[in-house]
Structure formats: C-alpha cells, structure tokens
C-alpha cells in the first residue's frame, strides 16, 4: 500500500510563508487524486485544495483561495501546498490524503464527496503561526 509522508511544517510569524510537501512511497502519483486538509486545535477537519496526479486539474475551497497554491511534481511523486501570508487562524495540523482517480475527481474530493475508507492519509505536519 502506498504511504504518504508530509513535511515542511513549522513555526512562523504572521505574514510569512511555508511550503508543505506530501511524498508518495511509490511511483504512482499519476493514479491518484491528492488533497490537503487541516485540523485546527479544537475544530473539525476542513478541506483546502485538491489536485489530480493524472492531469493536474485543481480545486480550491474558500478557505484556500487566494493564499494557498497546490502543485505536483510527478517525477518526484510529490504534491506541494504553498501557504502564503499566514495568519494565526492557519495554525493547524495539515494532512495530505490520496485516493485513486478511479473513485474520485478533484471536485468530489474537495467539494462534495470528501474522503473515504478507500483512501490513504499521511501522518500530518504541524503549522503554528504566532507573533
């Protein structure tokens, strides 16, 4: 089974940026839709952005539009999430999630259907924004 490993989190000040990475353990990014989610302390998990490893199509939720950018590097089997102009409200554990393109589109993963038992989660990476 594929494993996902997130990295790139850390502690930053308001207004700064971070780039999160989600690396696949196998060379199969083309077969997956990948989403970034986050869970702030004491709150429910929310979706941010999704990308198709197959065709690069993307979807952004309202929480991510304007400040976050998702991208992929199929040669490295890695998906990135660029976080710009971070605010205190962005403090959370950030997770990546992957599900086969057979079962999900980017719109379904981020917009409507959400995650399921068919997909895989990474272990999460902590982002802390404080002054």
Image (tube, grey):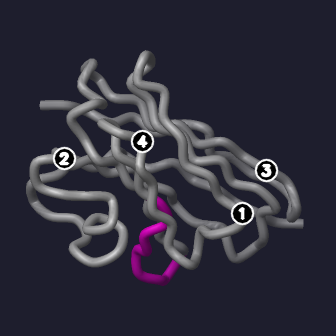
The residue that mark 1 highlights is 67
Q: Nearer the viewer, residue 39 or 22?
A: 22
Foreground label between 1 and 2: 2
Callout 4–callout 2 Cβ contact below 8 Å: no
From mark 4 to mark 3, how far is it between C-alphas? Answer: 23 Å
From mark 2 to mark 3, how far is it between C-alphas? Answer: 30 Å
Q: Kindly identify the residue that appears in the image at 82 percent across and 66 percent down.
A: 130
Foreground label between 4 and 3: 4
Percent position of residue 34, x then y: 34, 48
Which region shows up in magenta? 41-49
Q: Nearer the viewer, residue 72 or 97?
A: 72
User: At numbered mark 1, what does the secondary structure look like: helix, strand or loop?
Assistant: loop
From mark 4 to mark 2, how far is it between C-alphas? Answer: 12 Å
Q: Kindly identify the residue that appears in the image at 72 percent across and 46 percent down.
A: 18
Seen as rendered, the residue at the extreme bottom is: 43
Mark 4 surroundings within 10 Å by alpha-carbon count, few (fewer than 14), some (14 through 19), many (20 or more): some
Foreground label between 4 and 1: 4
Placement of 28 over or under 53, stated as above or below = above
Earlier along the polypeptide chain: callout 1 or callout 3? Answer: 3
Placement of 130 over or under 95, stated as above or below = below
Earlier along the polypeptide chain: callout 2 or callout 3? Answer: 3
The residue that mark 3 highlights is 17
Earlier along the polypeptide chain: callout 4 or callout 3? Answer: 3
Q: Kindly identify the residue that appears in the image at 26 percent across and 68 percent down.
A: 108
The residue that mark 2 highlights is 101
The residue that mark 4 highlights is 56
Q: Kindly identify the residue that appears in the image at 49 percent across and 82 percent down.
A: 42
Q: Quadrant of the N terminus?
A: top left
User: At numbered mark 2, what does the secondary structure look like: helix, strand or loop?
Assistant: loop
Callout 1–callout 2 Cβ contact below 8 Å: no
Indicate left or right for 68 with 94 as reference: right
């Amino acid at each position: 089974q594929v494993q996902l490993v997130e990295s790139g989190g850390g502690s930053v000040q308001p207004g700064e940026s971070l780039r999160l990475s989600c690396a696949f353990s196998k060379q199969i990014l083309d077969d997956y839709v990948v989403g970034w989610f986050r869970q702030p302390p004491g709150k429910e998990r929310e979706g941010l952005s999704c990308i198709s490893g197959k065709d690069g199509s993307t979807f952004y939720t309202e929480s991510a539009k304007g400040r976050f950018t998702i991208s992929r590097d199929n040669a490295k089997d890695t998906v990135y999430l660029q976080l710009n102009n971070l605010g205190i409200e962005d403090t959370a554990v950030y997770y990546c999630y992957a599900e086969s393109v057979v079962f999900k589109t980017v719109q379904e993963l981020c917009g409507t259907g959400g995650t399921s038992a068919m997909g895989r989660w990474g272990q999460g990476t902590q982002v802390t924004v404080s002054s």
